Image (cartoon, rainbow, N blue to C red):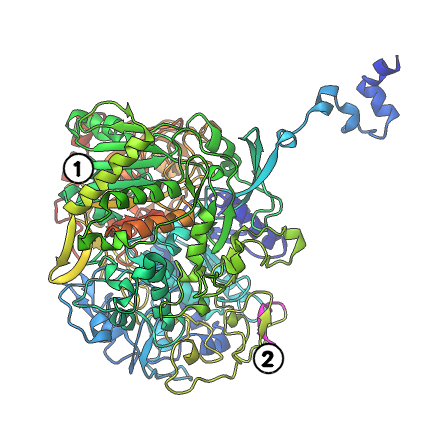
Amino acid sequence: MRGWLESWPVYRQFRGEDRSGRGESAMSRRTAELRPRVGTADRVVKSVCPYCAVGCGQDVFVKDEKVVQIEGDPDSPVSRGRLCPKGSASLQLTTGSARRYDVLYRRPYGTEWERLSLDEAMDMIADRVIEARERGWQWEEDGARVRRTMGFASLGGATLDNEENYLIKKLFTALGAIQIENQARI
Amino acid sequence: MAECHPVGFQWVMEAKARGATVVHVDPRFTRTSALADLHVPLRAGSDIAFLGGLVNYVLTHEKDFREYVLAYTNAATIVGEEFRDTEDLDGVFSGLDRENRSYDPMTWQYEGAVVQAASGERDQEYEERTEAESTIREAARGEAHGAGGAGVSGEIHTDETLTHPRCVFQILKRHYARYTPEMVEQVCGVPQETFRRVCELVTENSGRERTTAFAYAVGWTQHTVGAQYIRTASILQSLLGNIGRPGGGILALRGHASIQGSTDIPTLFNLLPGYIPMPHAHQNETLDEFVQAEGAEKGYWGNLRSYLVSLMKAWWGPAATEDNDYAFGYLPRLTGSHSTYETVMAQLEGTCHGYFLMGENPAVGSANAKMQRLGMAALDWLVVRDFSLIESATWWKDGPEIETGELRTEDIGTEVFFLPAAAHTEKSGSFTNTQRLLQWHRQAVEPQGDARSDLWFTYHLGRRIRAKLAGSADEMNRPLLDLTWDYPVHGAIAEPDAEAVLAEINGSGPDGRPLSAYTELTDDGSTSCGCWIYCGVYADGVNQADRRKPRTEQDWVAKEWAWAWPANRRILYNRASADPDGRPWSERKAYVWWDGQKWTGHDVPDFEPGKAPDYRPEEGAKGPDALSGTDAFIMQADGKAWLYAPAGLVDGPLPAHYEPHESPFTNPLYSQQSNPVRQVIRHPENRYQPPGSEVFPYVTTTYRLTEHHTAGGMSRWLPYLAELQPEFFCEISPELAAERGLEHLGWATIVTARTAIEARVLVTERLTPLRVGGRTLHQVGLPYHWGPNGLSTGDAANELAPVVLDPNTHIQEVKAMACDIRPGRRPRGPALLEFVREYRRRAGITDETGMEM
């Protein structure tokens, strides 16, 4: 009898502290038992939002080696726990159905994508770089030494890590490429 | 800012809650305008006139912060006799070479001295600085947002009374005298009362007790005079004493997580890490000649040789020796501009055969998107690394040119590799945010399937190429085979250790231990450092970028959260926050100060810790030693903030208002219509519109929305974001809708000389007609996020844009274009081409149109 009565919100409202009926007294059992997704995570990994350059802090919640939620990091003096619509959609960006996980290959004059193993693709790309580099090689221009290749170019970097940019610039410069560019000009 | 950097905007609102006044100057009314005290709509492409009007107001009403101006700017410096201003030459500066469309900047120099620029183009005066012979025209420009700095040779002359007719202050006064409120009204469409209100707000809020900040984004940079926009703000802020002080500054709000980092550690053609210029081709150039030409005698660019030798040691290790000039000859050389738009031309000409796209989507994200796709169609091979099948990966199959019949899939010879990329949660590394803060993100999970980080891709690609070429005796392969390329790897996929790369960037000393500051770098090959301005990020072997002391446990500067370059300094040039004697300008604005023994304060002082305010250098002192105790701008050749730039810019020492390349108006300020040295590209697919054309009577500008990101690669595929902004639209005023018969939620076709696109119509008072040059001007707003792929689709606004560039930065002018707009959808297939051809015929467009100086 008492249990039945207590399941009635109005009874709880009049008996308990929550007289306005906007807190505990109005809560169903199901609601009371709900737990945030982040509550059952195995670990929280500190991260940074990948969209714009404000650099909002993110907490990445991992369960069973899968990312289950991404939220704003309240510790961050930059963002104080907040994220914008894009940052809040980071979970969908990183785990959504639009992401591809396979290498695709379109052969010259081909009309469709084909599959290729990552290893094969890497090997083919290495060959293409060597060939294009040699074809576009210049020792001199107008009598001045240039020691470079105009045979291949690279674009992008502003969405990548500093360390990635460093390796791109280092490798391609050592290969003699100069046409290395990113989003800073757009 | 509320639209595009919403979480950063919370600090503007925080300031407003404490009494700050917020002014929003923007052609459109946005969420920022809604929260600002004053919204000032203006004509897109007229900001130099607006800011120049503010400079004129400050000078006319003597509102400058005179003590600051005298101590910390070059206001008193005398400019050489040969200099001629736009006032003397009706809109152009002395040194204009009409044949080569370029300026010789030598006449812009100070009297008695040749100074090097802090950033920007530093190779312009190579011959004067080295007395060497050069056979190659120097055309490449430096980076505009650099850390810059450089040298003075000779003796600078000054007039502390600021009355000498050739002192910078007087030149400035004459130059901006014509930027009156009446002129601002005529050029910008801003009523004089509104403009005066802005002048009063800005000047009343500057001085000892108060500071004013300017925040900007690509609305200021994507113009043929973009670098000069920022220069105008620099002049204004320097006159008002708003640089180097808390609450002041000119703040670039950048749009990608590491766009600052990819500029500092540049995937850019004209720079090496830390804003060291890429060398240009010169006869027999040695390391010493390069340092002499590009470095400085005074200030921290005086140590360029140490920065560069340490970089060469990081890249080539034991192969970089004193005997071989520390492998300086291994660096490839520039011969002009090799920016992304020149690369497209090289693809079209058949000299560039292969292309890597690393998280960028130029098929819709770059100006004149069609040229980008045609360039890719001329390649032998293309590698696209991204999350999803973006337009740059699929144009050969379903691009707009397939629909119009200009390309046939079966005829396109480009081999395309699509490699899935790892997300930020699947790799460790650092992003540098827009305030120079390096923040480490830790790997949470392993990437699935074939997805890999770009660290993995680049490292293993390099490893494979090196293996294939191992043993080669060809001199061409020496830099590659001598390269230091041994990074520890871990896990099943052999992911390189990002922290090992960070350690290399930080640099190490002779004992192999991590360095703590760039002041430890030497030029004798005993130190190595991959990016001198990042030196200290791995001090004591600790990843300083990964510091995460909660904000609640430290002060408002939050120095123990992550790490800011340089030296964990949060405000640059903060010596200027104190007066010449080292005392805070006011208690309210105290930031760093001289305590009698050393510099101290809330931030890391941007000054030698023990250099007293009354320190004066000995005669002949060089580098940092040559800076006096009041030379607050320590990267500058003369230690001063530049109101007038004697070097570094290729289009003039002072900003002048020029009309956008495609403008419906003639320039009311000068008979020179547009920037005379703007970079034009002649190509059948890049036809320009004539200035003042009645066929293209409206102004259009592109921008972002809160719910999408750049060219859409990280947002148009997400259901949440696609639902929030489901398709491409244009914003127009009710007046324009009535004039052209456009219906809300109906379709509009927007036309330029390049092509026509269609968009849903949003009729809104957020865009308002302006009175410009005596007539009503309507502006068309175009968010640029779209393309045909993904969940949220639409035409790309960049189809409309011409490739015409700022000559300093090679950035395209997409923020102010002229267009036509009409009701209904655009034609399909070959009919679209005919439709645009008819527009060109009506406007009388030929291959010469727009090419005039």
Q: Is residue B67 above or below residue B551?
A: below
Residue farthest top in this picture: A1
Q: Chain of mark 1?
A: B
- Residues B357 and B10: in front is B357
Q: Can residue B181 be seen at all in this image of the molecule?
A: no
Tag 1: Cα neighbours inside 10 Å, few (<14), some, or many (≥20)? many
x%, y% of residue B413?
17, 31
Q: Which mark is residue B597?
A: 2
Q: Which residue is mark 1?
A: B378
Magenta stretch bounds: B588-595
Q: Nearer the viewer, residue B360 or B249?
A: B360
Q: Quadrant of residue B154?
A: bottom left
Badge 2 or badge 1: first in the primary sequence: 1
* Discs 2 and 1 carry the same chain letter: yes
Instruction: Give the main secondary structure, helix, strand or loop, of the magenta stretch.
Output: loop
Q: Residue furthest front?
A: B471
Secondary-structure class at tag 1: loop
Percent position of residue B26, x then y: 43, 49
In this rendering, position of residue B559 left or right of residue A95: right
- On what subunit does the disc labeled 2 rest? B
Quarter-wise, where is residue B182 in the image? bottom left
Residue B762 highlighted magenta (yes or no): no
Quadrant of residue B174 in the image? Answer: bottom left
Label number found at residue B214: none
Spatial separation of the CA atoms under disc 2 and disc 1 = 65 Å
Give coordinates of residue B549: x percent, y percent.
Answer: 62, 52
Name the foreground residue: B424 vs B540: B540
